[in-house]
Image (spheres, rainbow, N blue to C red):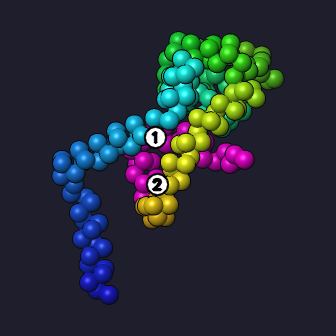
Amino acid sequence: MQNKARMQTMVGEDLLFLTDDQLRRGIEAMFFAYRAFTADPDLILAEMDYGRAHHRALHFIHRSPGLTVTALLAVLGVTKQSLNRVLRTLIEDGLVESRVGRRDRRERLLYLTEAGTALERRLSAAQRARMRTAYRNAGPQAVAGFRQVLEAMMDPETRAQYQAMKDLPEED
């Protein structure tokens, strides 16, 4: 039992003293994982002459129907001009609906249309399948550790936005 505890301590200590090469391998793993994670949606988006910003907008509008343009701007961390270009296209193509706010008529509340919901599901289906497979293969401890690492990489403001999104009801 003491050996096991000593080994766990040693493993924990090893994590505190990562070499530059180990860190570089982690960075490269993230690059390659992100490329794989976005590959399937990228093919669908390319057919429609859309980019990843369109996908992210669809994702977050789906996740939080009635999201304000201001809130989406904060979540995506893009310029107002860039977001306006993306939203204009999505609205013109009938994927997103912009409604006037009930409390503040200057606010624009964003909702996916039926076509927008269908596209969002199509884009995220492959990503959910990829995540599900990876999580199952890695196991629950690795999943928890992975989330801890991702959250630890976020700055406090981003982490707060993420936590707020985590508290939303799960989708169907």
In-image side of 163 versus 109 (left or right): left
x 68%, y 48%: residue: 170
x 65%, y 37%: residue: 121
- What crowding class fits label 1: few (fewer than 14 Cα within 10 Å), some (14-19), or many (20 or more)? some
Image mark for residue 37: 1
In-image side of 71 versus 94 (left or right): left
| Labels 2 and 1: the sequence-earlier one | 1
127 and 44: which is toward the camera: 44
In the rendered image, is residue 83 in sight?
no
In the displayed orientation, state which residue is furthest to the right.
102
Query: Callout 1: helix, strand or loop?
Result: helix
Where 99 falls versus 71 (above or below)?
above
- What crowding class fits label 2: few (fewer than 14 Cα within 10 Å), some (14-19), or many (20 or more)? few
Query: Callout 2: helix, strand or loop?
Result: helix
- Residue type at mark 2? Ala
125 and 80: which is toward the camera: 125
The dominant secondary structure in magenta is helix
Image mark for residue 149: none
- Residue type at mark 1? Phe
* Residue at mark 2: 134
Image quadrant where one finds the N terminus: bottom left
x 23%, y 63%: residue: 14
Residue bounds of the magenta highlight: 145-172
Write down the quadrant of residue 44 in the picture: top right
x 50%, y 29%: residue: 43
